Image (cartoon, rainbow, N blue to C red):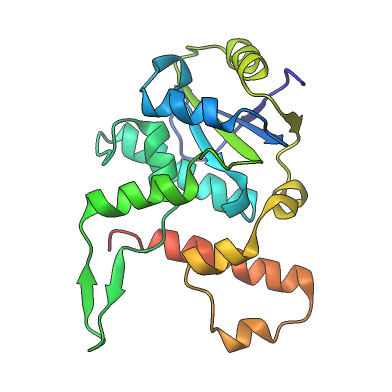
Amino acid sequence: MSSEIEVVQLDHIPSRHVIHLALFQDVGNAEFLHKQLLSRNADFEYAFVDASVIVSRLHLLSAVFKAVTSASNDVLKTPNVHSEIVANLAASNNVRNHAHSVIQMTDAPQIAEAYRRYGVSTATKNLVAVKVAENGSPSTEQIAEHLAKNVEGTQVPATDEKLASTADMSKVFKYYKLNGLNWLDKIKDHSAKQKEVEMLVVGAMALRGL
């Protein structure tokens, strides 16, 4: 396992927040990692995201940006910035009933559903780990060492290509309600279709809470 980890720079994020990102493939101890989160082990305060539901860096980092901004403004809806990242991956919590009127879902059930859909589970095979350090604590080296020691998997660069290769598009289409979009199905160019899916997914996340 590599001990390298990417430090991501996002515009308009206070400099005291340092964002670390790593992608692991063929993870063999997802059950262990899931248990650490359930037990609220402070040593494992990460956003552990199932990579099968991530289509691109923009998709992931949109959730990260929103979470860090909420933390900076002290308006988190979840216990910490890392759980907020996972929750922010959810699509809009506005749904329509059979009369086509908009219903606002309560936050708690949707947050729990977001953890189940987007967070690490015992079945996770490919994992994205995000760690937001504040004021240099923990250090990049400490985070890299901790992940290398505790995640049993092959670390690879978190590029758009790698994320696309680990995405399960059937899950993505289901969770972001993209099934039945005839115009999307008609796009034959793979890269063009991927970009449209990315825009739809990010748009669905942006609408969450409105």
Residue for point 65% across, 41% down: 125
> Where does the N terminus fall, quadrant-wise?
top right
Residue 44, given in percent of the width and then of the height, sits at 47, 20
Residue 6, given in percent of the width and then of the height, sits at 67, 28
The correct choice, above or below, for 126 with respect to 16 in the image is: below
Q: Quadrant of residue 68?
A: top left
Residue for point 39% across, 16% down: 42
Q: Quadrant of residue 193?
A: bottom right
Q: Nearer the viewer, residue 129 or 206?
A: 129
- In-image side of 131 versus 195 (left or right): left
Residue for point 26% across, 53% down: 109
> Where does the C terminus fall, quadrant-wise?
bottom left
Marker count (numbered)? 0
Q: Nearer the viewer, residue 79 or 159?
A: 79
Residue 23, given in percent of the width and then of the height, sits at 67, 35
Residue 141, given in percent of the width and then of the height, sits at 64, 11
The correct choice, above or below, for 24 with respect to 45 in the image is: below
Residue for point 51% across, 68% down: 174
